[in-house]
């Protein structure tokens, strides 16, 4: 797309209402906003492209430069320090950091964004200009992310999820917290993902500059807030936490009894154990202060300690809901819920960008309430499932009784796992294809597995059913999926 102006808009007939959000009664027009209130969306004289281009926050180059500084220091390594000395090492770090900051400032000066009609356009580049146009009708969600440095400076990053995108689109890093919250609501309103657009002239509805209220208070009707104490205990009830004392004892015994153990060997072992603990620690940091709310047809999720995230999940694009009962959690009666949302990239490098967290840890009544909000009419605590034939024990000697499947009014449900129990719920309207699969041993036993695939690539699998039952189940699933898609509201 070129960097030129957009096509002129059609002038509405006299007496008609131009397209755009309607200000509520009593709201002041943009030109009469009180002093100090942000006014980033004022239209330029003469119309033009609808509004002037906006730049990112002036502190954005500082944050980008700080990230580059960490990479520079790590790249130079301590061997360079020992060869050139501390003085020249500090000079090299300062020069490289200054260069990174200058590049960040130049990039910031040439980066801008604005809304043209129903598109968000982002402009980047100095020598090679690039313009990205994001159609807002394909917008699924806008996520507000606040890394640690952004929290310390009162900034936030905006990330957009678009249908069919290979990754998160057009991250705007960084904006003020208040500006990021207003821009997110505006983009979602233009995309039709929220009920109404906040009035630009309503000063009471707009957060004050530098305020953190839009991210601290989850909008909508509160559903559940996970206790941080339960989150910590749940991660202690993991195999990694139970094996850690044995690993430490092994290192200590080897160090005391074997004189050949060097400091490097001990450090390597400790590093390996730290890598084992990385996953539960990361889960605690990511799910800290987890809060869930219902806002019309969307779920609002807020979570994170060092990096806070505010995500919007459209309920109309939920493909599957999964419940997991880890073995060590059963003594507490706990489980976790996850969901799959259509339109989010499966190629995303960082799985934290995907809004799959529905309940990090909780009991069955809480999970039942949340599932009923996501899938109306479905009760997680009342899903009787049929087990496969007894001859399935030749394939699953220990997990035969854990397998199950069932057809209900609106959803298809499967269960699997002996030690880690898993339940998958798929609405019929989300089923894209149905497959019957037989392996060589299944053919000898007269068994087959039925796969109900969704657009996200996963779905649910009824494992090792009787062959005649499998074909009947596949035919029933195909009919129900077709009827659900035919009668569902677009």
Image (spheres, rainbow, N blue to C red):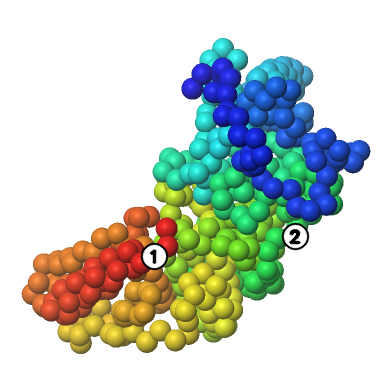
Q: Residue at x 30, y 59 (%)?
A: 432
- In the rendered view, tell whether residue 158 sits above or below residue 455: above
Taking the image as shown, residue 131 lies to the left or right of residue 484, namely: right
> Which percent across, then down, holds residue 199?
75, 47
Query: Which secondary structure, mark 1?
Result: loop
Q: Residues within 10 Å of mark 1 (few under 14, many from 20)?
A: few
Q: Nearer the viewer, residue 283 or 489?
A: 489
Q: Are marks 1 and 2 in contact (CB under 8 Å)?
A: no
Q: Nearer the viewer, residue 100 or 239?
A: 100
Residue ranking furthest to the front: 14
Q: Quadrant of the C terminus?
A: bottom left
Q: Identify the mark nearer the N-term, 1 or 2.
A: 2
Residue ranking furthest to the top: 127
> Which percent across, then down, holds residue 414?
34, 75
Q: Nearer the viewer, residue 253 or 222?
A: 222
Query: Which secondary structure, mark 2?
Result: loop
Taking the image as shown, residue 239 lies to the left or right of residue 225, namely: left
Taking the image as shown, residue 417 lies to the left or right of residue 129, namely: left
Label 2, on which residue? 217
- Residue 316 showing in the rendered view: yes
Q: Nearer the viewer, mark 1 or mark 2?
A: 1
Q: Residues within 10 Å of mark 2 (few under 14, many from 20)?
A: few
- In the rendered view, tell whether residue 283 sits above or below residue 471: above
**Cα distance between the residues tagged 1 and 2:** 33 Å
Label 1, on which residue? 488
- In the rendered view, tell whether residue 44 sits above or below residue 344: above
Q: Residue at x 51, y 62 (%)?
A: 315
Q: Residue at x 59, y 37 (%)?
A: 171
Report the disc number at residue 303: none
Q: Residue at x 44, y 41 (%)?
A: 165
């Amino acid at each position: 797309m070129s960097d030129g102006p957009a096509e002129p808009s059609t002038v509405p007939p006299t007496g008609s209402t131009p397209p755009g959000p309607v200000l509520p009664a009593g709201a002041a027009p943009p030109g009469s906003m009180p002093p100090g209130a942000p006014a980033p969306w004022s239209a330029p004289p003469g119309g033009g492209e609808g509004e002037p281009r906006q730049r990112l926050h002036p502190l954005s180059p500082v944050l980008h430069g700080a990230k580059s500084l960490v990479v520079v220091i790590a790249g130079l390594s301590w061997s360079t320090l020992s060869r050139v000395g501390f003085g020249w090492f500090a000079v090299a770090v300062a020069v490289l950091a200054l260069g990174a900051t200058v590049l960040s400032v130049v990039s910031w000066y040439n980066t801008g964004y604005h809304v043209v009609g129903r598109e968000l356009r982002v402009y980047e580049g100095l020598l090679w200009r690039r313009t990205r146009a994001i159609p807002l009708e394909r917008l699924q969600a806008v996520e507000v992310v606040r890394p640690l440095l952004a929290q310390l400076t009162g900034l936030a990053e905006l990330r957009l999820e678009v249908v069919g995108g290979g990754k998160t689109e057009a991250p705007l890093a960084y904006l003020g917290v208040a500006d990021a919250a207003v821009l997110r609501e505006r983009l979602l309103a233009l995309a039709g993902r929220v009920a109404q657009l906040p009035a630009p002239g309503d000063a009471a509805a707009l957060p004050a500059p530098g305020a953190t209220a839009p991210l601290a208070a989850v909008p909508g009707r509160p559903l559940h807030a996970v206790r941080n104490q339960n989150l910590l205990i749940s991660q202690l009830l993991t195999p990694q936490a139970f094996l850690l004392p044995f690993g430490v004892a092994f290192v200590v015994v080897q160090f005391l009894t074997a004189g050949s153990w060097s400091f490097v060997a001990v450090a390597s072992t400790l590093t390996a154990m730290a890598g084992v603990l990385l996953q539960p620690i990361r889960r605690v940091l990511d799910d800290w202060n987890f809060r869930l709310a219902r806002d019309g047809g969307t779920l609002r999720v807020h979570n994170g300690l060092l990096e806070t995230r505010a995500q919007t999940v459209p309920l109309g694009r939920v493909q599957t809901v999964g419940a997991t009962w880890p073995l060590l959690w059963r003594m507490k009666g706990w489980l976790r819920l996850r969901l799959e949302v259509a339109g989010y990239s499966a190629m995303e490098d960082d799985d934290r960008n995907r809004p799959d967290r529905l309940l990090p840890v909780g009991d069955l009544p809480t999970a039942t309430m949340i599932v009923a909000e996501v899938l109306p009419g479905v009760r997680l605590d009342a899903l009787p499932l049929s087990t496969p034939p007894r001859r399935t024990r030749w394939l699953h000697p220990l997990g035969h009784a854990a397998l199950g499947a069932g057809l209900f009014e609106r959803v298809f449900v499967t269960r699997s796992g002996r030690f880690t129990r898993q339940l998958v719920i798929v609405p019929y309207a989300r089923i894209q294809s149905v497959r019957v699969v037989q392996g060589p041993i299944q053919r000898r036993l007269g068994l087959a597995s039925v796969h109900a695939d969704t657009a996200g690539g996963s779905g649910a699998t009824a494992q090792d059913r009787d062959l005649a039952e499998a074909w009947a189940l596949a035919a029933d699933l195909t009919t129900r999926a077709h009827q659900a898609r035919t009668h569902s509201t677009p």
